[in-house]
C-alpha cells in the first residue's frame, strides 16, 4: 500500500492524503484560522448556568464558547489556583513538582460551586465553531507530542488501547513512569510502540518546554488571548498520521518543504528522503489527479465502479447516504449476490467519503436490502475494517431490520464542503455538473453499450465536449480504444446543449 501526502501552498495550504493513488483525506489550513482544535486560551468566564450545568466563556469568538461541568477536569480547582498565582507574579516555578494540589471536584457537582463570573481560566478548544455554534472547550488541558500527550495537574499514566501486546504496554508504562515529571500525567500514543526511552524522553522534554513557555505568557496576559497554538497543520498531520507506510511527501513550496524535512528529521530521520519539492509547471494537484478526484467526489451524487452510485444528503442533525446499484449488467447468479457486491463496494466508498468530507454526527446509510444474515454480517465487518484507519472516534451499529446502518462519528471541525457545480455556459441562472463528471458519465454509458455487444458506435456531443474527447495525445478516445478495442466516431453537434450527448448504432438509431 502506497501512502502519499501532497501539499499545495497558496492563500491557504491544502493537504491531500492519497492511498494507492486514491484521495482519502483532504485538509485545508487557512491563514486566519484562530480557533483550531488543540489551541489553548486564557479566557474569562462570562456566565455559569446551573440549568445546563455549564458555563459560557469568552474566548474572543463572536459567540461564547461552551464549557460543560464534565469538561472541567477533576483538578480544575488546582488549575484555577495555579492561574491566579502565575498571573499575579507570585509563582514563577511552572514545573508543578512543589505545587500544592487541591482536592478533586465532585463528579456530580454543580458548575456554580466551581466557577464564578469574570474568573480567569485556561481552556482548550476541543471542537471548532460549527454552523451557528461557538467553540466547545475543556479546561482539562493536554499538549500532544509525537509519542506522548502531556496532561498537567494529573498523575495518571495511560497507554493507547490500539497497542495490543500486554508486554509492550507494561514496558511502555514502566519507561514512562521512570521519566514522568511530578504533577503531570502522560498518555502514550500508538506510534510509541517499540520506541526507546531516549526518544520518549526527548518528546517529553519538548512538551514540558512548551508548557513552561505558555505559562510565561500568563503573567499580565490580555483576556481573552491564545497563549499556546497547535503546531501548523502540516506538522500536526504528520504527527498524527505519519508512519513507515508513507512512500512520499510532495510539496510545491521551498520553505514549507524545508519545514517538513526539519520536522521529519526530529520524528523519523530515516524517512527525510521521501520529502520532495514539486518543480513541474503542471500544478501539483493536477499532476497527481487530485483536482479530478475532488470534482467527482464532493457532489451530491458519487459514482462508483460497475455503475453503482451514492446519493449523499445533509440535514442539520444528520447525514443520509443512499446506496444505488444503478442500471448495470451483472454476471451474479441472483439478486442477493448483486446486492452484496454493490453493498461491499459502497461500504468502502462510504468509509472514504466520511474521512474525505470530515462528516460528523449521525450518519445513516441505506444499503440495498439483503435477506441472508451471513451477508449482512459480512457487510458490517467489511465496513468496520474499512473504517479502521479513520482517526475520528466513531461507532458503527449492525444493520437494522430495514437494512440501515447507523454510524456516529466525532465532529470537531466544520465539514469539508467543496462546490463542484459550475455556471451554465448555455446561459440562464442554473448550474451544471463539472465537465469532468460528464466525461465520466459518458465513459460509464460507453462501457454498458460495449457489454451489450454494440459494434460500431457514434457519439454526438456539444463541440466543446467533442474537442475534449478527441484532442491531445493520447486523447480520451484513444484510451477508450486501448481499453475496449472499439473505435468510437465522435461528431460535434452545434445544436446540442452543453450537457447533451447521445450514442447511435451503425444504422444511425439512437441507443443511449
Image: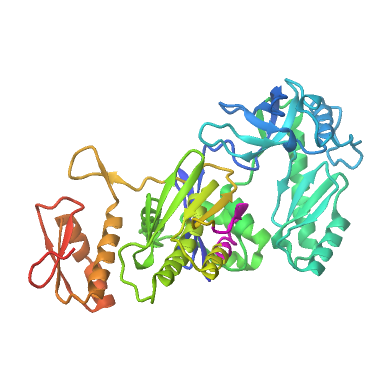
> In the figure, residue 100 lies in which quadrant?
top right
Q: Establish if 132 lies above or below 281.
A: above
Residue 494 visible in this rendered orientation of the protein: yes
Q: Quadrant of residue 469?
A: bottom left
Residue placed at 44% from the left, 46% from the top?
10
Q: Position of residue 138 (x, y in %)?
A: 70, 37
Q: Nearer the viewer, residue 316 or 379?
A: 379
Q: Is residue 167 left or right of residue 372?
A: right
Residue 277 visible, this angle = no
Judge from the rendering whether residue 98 lies leftward or rightward of residue 77; answer left or right. Answer: right
Q: Is residue 98 magenta?
A: no
* Front one among 230 and 393: 393
Please provide the residue range marked out in magenta. Answer: 384-399
| Point 46% across, 68% down: residue | 340
Which part of the image, by quadrant, shows the C terminus?
bottom left
Q: Main secondary structure of the magenta part?
A: loop
Q: Nearer the viewer, residue 311 or 153?
A: 311
Amino acid at each position: 500500500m502506497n501512502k502519499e501526502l501532497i501539499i499545495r501552498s497558496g492563500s491557504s495550504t491544502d493537504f491531500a492524503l492519497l492511498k494507492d493513488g486514491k484521495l482519502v483525506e483532504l485538509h485545508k489550513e487557512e491563514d486566519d484560522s484562530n480557533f483550531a482544535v488543540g489551541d489553548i486560551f486564557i479566557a474569562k468566564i462570562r456566565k455559569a448556568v446551573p440549568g445546563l450545568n455549564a458555563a459560557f466563556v469568552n474566548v474572543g469568538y463572536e459567540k461564547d464558547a461552551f464549557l460543560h461541568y464534565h469538561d472541567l477536569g477533576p483538578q480544575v480547582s488546582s488549575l484555577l489556583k495555579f492561574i491566579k498565582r502565575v498571573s499575579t507574579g507570585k509563582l514563577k516555578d511552572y514545573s508543578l513538582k512543589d505545587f500544592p494540589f487541591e482536592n478533586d471536584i465532585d463528579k456530580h457537582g454543580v458548575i456554580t460551586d466551581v466557577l464564578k463570573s469574570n474568573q480567569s481560566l485556561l481552556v482548550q478548544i476541543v471542537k471548532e465553531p460549527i454552523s451557528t455554534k461557538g467553540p466547545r472547550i475543556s479546561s482539562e488541558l493536554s499538549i500532544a507530542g509525537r509519542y506522548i500527550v502531556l496532561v498537567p495537574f494529573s498523575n495518571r499514566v495511560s497507554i493507547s488501547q490500539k497497542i495490543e501486546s500486554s508486554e509492550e504496554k507494561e514496558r511502555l508504562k514502566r519507561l514512562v513512569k521512570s521519566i514522568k515529571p511530578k504533577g503531570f500525567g502522560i498518555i502514550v500514543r500508538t506510534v510509541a510502540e517499540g520506541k526507546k526511552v531516549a526518544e520518549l524522553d526527548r518528546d517529553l522534554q519538548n512538551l514540558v518546554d512548551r508548557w513552561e513557555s505558555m505559562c510565561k505568557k500568563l503573567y499580565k496576559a490580555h483576556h481573552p488571548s491564545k497563549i499556546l497554538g497547535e503546531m501548523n497543520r502540516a506538522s500536526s498531520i504528520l504527527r498524527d498520521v505519519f508512519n513507515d507506510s508513507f512512500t512520499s511527501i510532495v510539496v510545491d513550496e521551498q520553505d514549507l518543504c524545508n519545514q517538513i524535512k526539519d520536522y521529519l528529521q526530529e520524528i523519523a530521520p530515516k524517512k527525510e528522503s521521501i520529502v520532495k519539492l514539486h518543480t513541474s509547471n503542471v500544478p501539483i494537484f493536477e499532476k497527481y489527479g487530485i483536482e479530478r478526484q475532488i470534482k467527482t467526489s464532493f457532489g451530491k451524487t458519487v459514482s462508483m465502479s460497475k455503475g453503482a452510485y451514492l446519493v449523499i444528503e445533509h440535514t442539520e442533525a444528520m447525514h443520509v447516504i443512499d446506496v444505488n446499484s444503478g442500471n448495470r449488467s451483472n454476471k451474479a447468479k441472483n439478486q442477493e449476490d448483486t446486492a452484496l457486491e454493490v453493498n461491499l463496494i459502497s461500504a468502502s466508498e462510504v468509509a472514504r467519503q466520511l474521512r474525505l468530507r470530515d462528516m460528523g454526527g449521525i450518519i445513516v446509510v441505506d444499503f440495498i436490502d439483503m435477506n441472508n444474515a451471513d451477508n449482512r454480517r459480512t457487510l458490517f465487518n467489511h465496513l468496520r475494517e474499512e473504517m479502521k484507519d479513520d482517526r475520528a472516534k466513531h461507532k458503527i451499529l449492525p444493520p437494522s431490520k430495514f437494512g440501515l446502518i447507523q454510524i456516529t462519528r466525532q465532529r470537531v471541525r466544520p465539514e469539508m464542503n467543496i462546490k463542484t457545480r459550475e455556471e451554465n455556459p448555455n446561459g440562464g441562472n442554473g448550474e451544471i455538473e463539472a465537465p469532468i463528471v460528464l466525461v465520466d458519465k459518458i465513459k460509464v454509458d460507453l462501457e454498458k453499450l460495449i457489454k451489450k455487444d454494440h459494434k460500431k458506435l457514434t457519439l454526438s456531443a456539444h463541440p466543446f465536449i467533442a474537442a475534449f474527447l478527441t484532442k491531445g495525445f493520447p486523447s480520451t478516445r484513444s484510451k477508450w480504444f486501448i481499453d475496449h478495442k472499439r473505435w468510437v466516431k465522435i461528431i460535434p453537434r452545434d445544436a446540442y446543449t452543453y450537457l447533451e450527448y447521445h450514442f447511435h448504432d451503425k444504422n444511425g438509431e439512437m441507443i443511449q
